[in-house]
Image (cartoon, rainbow, N blue to C red):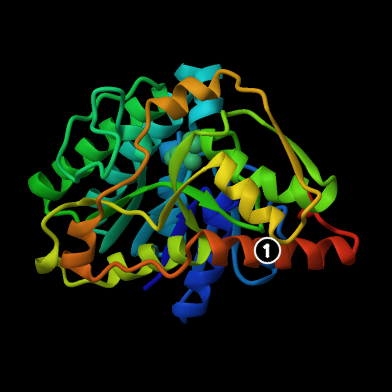
Amino acid sequence: MRILVTGATGQIGSELTLELRRHHRDDVVAAGHRRPAADKLAASGPFVRLDVTDRAALERVVREHRIEAIYHLAAVLSATGEQDPPRAWEVNVNGLYNVLEIARHRGLAQVFYPSSIAVFGPRTPRDATPQDTILSPTTIYGVTKVAGELLCDYYARRYGLDVRGLRYPGIISSETPPGGGTTDYAVEIFYAAVEKRSYTCFVREDTALPMMFMPDCLRAAIELMAAPNGNLRYRTYNITAMSFTAGEVAAEIRKHIPEFRVRYQPDFRQEIADSWPRSIDDSAARSDWGWKPVYGLKETTAEMLRALGERQAAGCLYPSG
Ligand code: SER
């Protein structure tokens, strides 16, 4: 299967591209709106510069590379979206619309669409948030993700397009840093612990959000896309691995780095975090396609500190670019 990954220079896209390249012998084409920072990305297969809001350019890439499936990771995240809502709409909704239109016209086999816990909002139950519930986002990012889910449902029902998605929680990873999300503190805190032994956290100590470590995030996408279509009751699934407060991750880090100190200085992202679920019910994903996370807070913390510690020792804590 010849695959295109949009947003391939982003936090998830960069690692998903490498993972797909390990699984598929045919080309996995990485597309990003800037040159890849990760050398591995450019060295391991084709890379094209692409703005997903440019439908003609997207169509050209799909045609020239004879693409059969698109993993559409290009998106503006929640905190960045609040700085420029029209841009968030343009990229997140019109970008997806371009992908879906090209997919149906060219008869593509599959589309993957990452949704988010940001589809939920203050009127949604915050604990064990169900699969079927009130979607009442207060961020433009959440609004675009709800619109995206509905568009995907529509294309599946109306045109028979095999489009599948996951409502990802905050994603923690040691490679490409996230770009402007509300859950970014759960990544920044590890870099700060390794580098400075202190961190100023932009949400309160008692803020709890659902999270997932990158290997689970990648495996979830690959397993969902490989599941028999007939087993899927939904196009987009709730999914989670763990939930913890900012204070709890700090305490877990202190088991490895006892002198680590955190100050809490909430900013505008606190209100966004407060509008999202504390924990997620992902039983539909578990029963329909066998979802089961591997990494909890303890394993994630140990692995993050190991990976970042190794990079710091090698003099390159931050990925280049
Ligand atoms: N991690 C994302 C964000 O904070 C949520 O999907 O924007």
Q: How many marks?
A: 1
Q: Kindly identify the residue that appears in the image at 68 percent across and 43 percent down.
A: 188
Crowd band around label 1 with a 10 angstrom C-alpha radius: few (<14), some (14–19), many (20+): some
Q: Is residue 294 above or below residue 316?
A: below
Residue 120 makes an appearance in the image: yes
Q: Percent from the top left, x then y, of residue 2?
A: 41, 69
Q: Nearer the viewer, residue 11 or 160?
A: 11
The residue that label 1 is drawn on is 42
Q: Percent from the top left, x then y, of residue 212?
A: 46, 55
Q: Nearer the viewer, residue 74 or 302?
A: 302
Check disc 1 and report its element: helix, strand or loop: helix
Q: Percent from the top left, x then y, of residue 4?
A: 45, 59
Residue 49 makes an appearance in the image: no
Q: Kindly identify the residue that appears in the image at 64 percent across and 67 percent down.
A: 303
Q: Quadrant of the N terminus?
A: bottom left
Amino acid type of the residue tagged 1 in the rendering: Ala
Q: Kindly identify the residue that appears in the image at 17 percent across and 72 percent down.
A: 228
Q: Kindly identify the residue that appears in the image at 56 percent across and 40 percent down.
A: 246
Q: Nearer the viewer, residue 282 or 72?
A: 282
Q: Is residue 249 above or below residue 266?
A: below
Q: Nearer the viewer, residue 108 or 114?
A: 114
Q: Percent from the top left, x then y, of residue 105?
A: 23, 49
Q: Is residue 44 above or below residue 145?
A: below
77 horizontally vs 36: left or right: left
Q: Quadrant of residue 229?
A: bottom left
Q: Is residue 9 above or below residue 289?
A: above
205 horizontally vs 71: left or right: right
